[in-house]
Each structure stands twice: as C-alpha cells, then as structure tokens.
Image: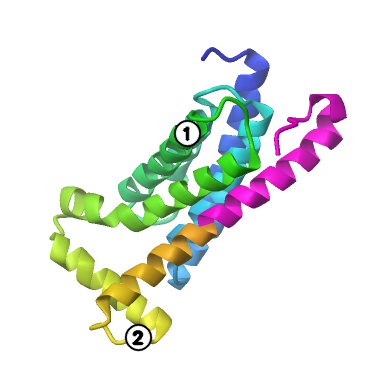
Amino acid sequence: MKFTTRQLVMLAVFGALWGVAEISLGSVLHVLKIPQTGAFMAGIGLCIALIGRLFVPGRGSTIFIGVVAMFLKLFSIGSILIGPMIGILAEASAAELVLSVFKTPSRFGFVLAGGLGVLITFIQPFITGPILFGQGILSVWLDTLDVGARLFGLPSTAAFAIIAILAIVTLVIGCAAGWLAWGAGRILQTRMLGTENVVLSK
C-alpha cells in the first residue's frame, strides 16, 4: 500500500518511539539481566506499533514501524545487535500477518497480533541461535530450560512444564500488549483526531 507523506511521517514517529524504547529501557534491562526482558520489550514495542496501526491502518504500516525501530536498534549499547534487530522485524512481521487477515482494525485482531508477535521471542532463539551464533538446538533447549527452572523454581527435569509455562507467559504478555494498544490508541485518536475519525470496531 502507498502511504501519503503525512502517514509516512507518522509511521516514522511510532517506529522511532519503539527504537528509543529498545535503545534505552531495553539496553538497561538486558544489562541487569531481568528475566523475560525480550518478551517485555517486544510487548512494549508492539504496543507502540499497534497504536501506530490505528493511526495508519493500511497494510504494511506495522512492518514499516518495525523497520524504523530495527535500524535505530543499531545505536543500542552492546556488541550483539543482529539477533535483536532480526527479532524486531520478526515481531512486526508476525503482527502484520495477523492484522492483514482482518479487513478493519479490531481489539480481537490486536490481541492476536500482540500475542503472536511476542511469542516470536520464545521461538526465535531456536532459529537464530544455530544460524547466527553457531549454537546447537540442544544447547538452546538446555539454556531455555535453565532459565525457566530458575525463574519458576522448577527442576530442570520438568521440561514440559517449564516450556509450557514460558510459552504461556510470553503469550499473555503479548495479548496484554495488544489489548492495551487498542484502548490507548483509541483514546489518543479521540484526543488528537476527534471522535469522527476514531476506528469504530470493537
């Protein structure tokens, strides 16, 4: 879809907001080694991107926002940037895929888009680990189990429970981000554009 100059500027602003969040808050959380940092940052980023989707509801707008955020990620603190940059683009692409199924924006679509977009952060290490960093699938699997075991206080032998809980927590974070984006976006639209321009889907 072609965007007007005004729409491109708006998309760039939302992309910059996502990128700045990654550069500032994301870098701090990673340095502090806060659990589930990737999922939380994906939730924040997709919340911003989905609000942008309300303002520019055309197809491709979510990916555009993600691309802007991805390039801004280059200015983050740290040496390993390829993985997170691919992650941002994958999250935006997953959300875009879900949103493209719906003719008009809706809360349900936003919740699904947020859920799938953040769930990508759980799946991504199993793909980028072996391809980009030479990690074996088994190594990534064991690292995931170790993180889950420490986070939930479960023995590492409870592999199924750990993976299931991690996946559910990640999915809930994403769905919550989509829900929040819909509500916050509609409020912003009402204040900035007036009630006649607010998306009416529920």
Query: In whole angstroms, how far apart are the C-alphas of marks 2 and 1?
Result: 35 Å
The amino acid at mark 2 is Leu
Label 2: few (<14), some (14–19) or many (≥20) C-alpha neighbours in 10 Å: some
Q: Is residue 77 left or right of residue 13?
A: left
Q: Is residue 25 left or right of residue 188?
A: left
- Give the structural element (helix, strand or loop) at label 1: helix
> Which residue is located at x 80 percent, y 25 percent?
197
Determine the main secondary structure of the stretch shown in magenta.
helix
The amino acid at mark 1 is Glu
Q: Give residue 107's quadrant in the image.
A: top right
Q: Where in the figure is residue 25, as x and y percent of width and height?
A: 56, 58
In this orientation, which residue lies closer to the viewer: 175 or 87? 175
Q: Where in the figure is residue 127, as x and y percent of width and height?
A: 23, 50
Q: Is residue 55 left or right of residue 36?
A: right
Q: Where in the figure is residue 56, as x and y percent of width and height?
A: 64, 25
> Which residue is located at x 82 percent, y 28 percent?
193
> Looking at the image, can residue 20 be seen?
no
Q: Is residue 192 magenta?
A: yes
**Which stretch is magenta?**
174-202
Q: Which residue is mark 2?
A: 154
> Looking at the image, can residue 72 be seen?
yes
- Give the structural element (helix, strand or loop) at label 2: loop
> Which residue is located at x 21 percent, y 67 percent?
141
Q: Where in the figure is residue 200, as x and y percent of width and height?
A: 75, 31
In this orientation, which residue lies closer to the viewer: 88 or 181? 181
Q: Which residue is mark 1?
A: 96
